[in-house]
Amino acid sequence: MKIGFIGLGNMGAPMAANLVKAGHQVTGFDTAGVTVDGVVTADTAEAAASGQDVVITMLPNGAILRAVAAQVIPAMDKGAVLLDCSTVDVDSARAVADQATSAGCSALDAPVSGGVGGATNGTLTFMVGGPEAAFETARPLFDIMGQKAVHCGDAGAGQSAKICNNMILGVTMIATCEAFALADKLGLDRQKMFDVVSTSSGYSWTMNAYCPAPGVGPTTPADNGYKPGFAAELMLKDLGLSQQAAEAVDADTPMGAAALALYRQFVEDEDGRGMDFSAMLPRFEKRGRG
Ligand code: NAD
């Protein structure tokens, strides 16, 4: 397949590299001038997009996606698929899909879970919104870049799934961290806490697979000085997207709102910037109730 790839950052570069390794012809563009072995570098986003079967975008946010889409959709061949893998707001995903459809192309919103490790190892999970036919066109690419792709529904459904998942993730990480900090103050050994909770009704991905306590459970960013991993700033971004969506549809999400407020305080007023999102544990350790 002929593929354009726009946004070759921490996630995009290894995803594009995996497509090249699988034998696809990939032309890339990134405003920061990033190059990737085996990816032909284009001078502009339009040049990367024209004449391709699929154009993949992996960009920081919805405003940038909208700007890039306005540039590249007119340059794309009729019938080509715009496959956006960024995490953006649902409205931007739907606006870009409408624009692609009006231009005789189709679009999929396909945000990912799995982080840089998943992008490098080709084990991402894709949550996909958009037409079935476009999903089938992109399926072989999902199989290379990931281990699972779920077609969630129409345009925006992929982003909806992503922000709901990450709202659960942010809330459970906070719950896991505050429970560890409480257990510490009650004099409970952290290993015993893990042994009980990881096999009891308090178990979760954040406890069992991404334990925020160093030296306990599997190896995680906690064992590496809380270097990300999944940065607290990215969790803040995703919790902001879920609250924006909740407001738009009048959904009551008090735990998501509380998680957003805590991550905002952690990143903007405390020492959370540049730390993994599990560094909420040392944050709670340092604090009392006041
Ligand atoms: P990143 O900042 O490393 O990469 C974004 C790239 O886009 C940069 O290289 C930047 O130069 C480029 N870019 C910005 N504006 C551009 C433009 N107008 N035209 C072309 N290129 C442009 O970010 P990342 O970590 O790769 O994340 C990308 C997306 O994936 C984000 O939406 C993020 O929320 C999502 N995501 C990230 C992770 C993660 O662990 N890093 C996990 C899941 C999802």
Image (cartoon, rainbow, N blue to C red):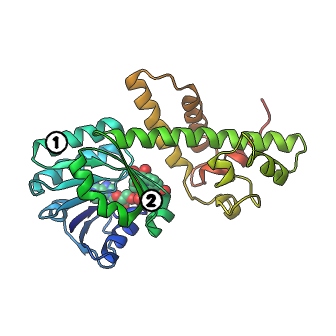
Q: Nearer the viewer, residue 225 or 136?
A: 136
Q: Nearer the viewer, residue 258 or 53?
A: 53
Q: Which residue is pictured at 37% across the width and 51% down the height?
A: 60
The answer to whether the residues at label 2 and label 1 have Cβ atoms under 8 Å apart is no
Residue at x 50% of width, y 22% of height: 252
The quarter of the rendered structure image containing the C terminus is top right
Q: Identify which amino acid the numbered label 2 is placed on.
A: Leu
Disc 1 residue: CB within 8 Å of ligand 1: no
**Residue 12 position by quadrant:** bottom left
Residue 71's spot in the image, x, y percent?
17, 52
Residue positioned most to the right: 187
Q: Dot 1: few (<14), some (14–19), or many (≥20) neighbours within 10 Å?
A: some
Point 33% across, 68% down: residue: 16
Residue 89 horizontal/vertical position (percent): 36, 39
Q: Residue beneath label 2, please?
A: 124
Please name whichever residue, 62 or 264, is drawn nearer the observer in this view of the structure.
Answer: 62
- 152 w.r.t. 243: above or below: below
Look at the numbered disc 2 and say if its residue's Cβ is closer than 8 Å to ligand 1. Answer: no
Q: Compared with residue 283, is residue 16 higher up or lower down, i.e. above or below?
A: below
Which label sits on residue 99?
A: 1
Ligand 1 location (quadrant): bottom left
- Image check: 259 left or right of 131? right
The answer, for residue 268, to whether it is visible in the render is: no
- Image coordinates of residue 221 in percent, x first then y, are 64, 60
Quadrant showing the N terminus: bottom left
- Residue at 90% from the left image edge and 44% from the top image edge: 187
Give whichever of discs 2 and 1 has the lower sequence position. 1
Element under disc 2: strand
Secondary structure under tag 1 reads helix
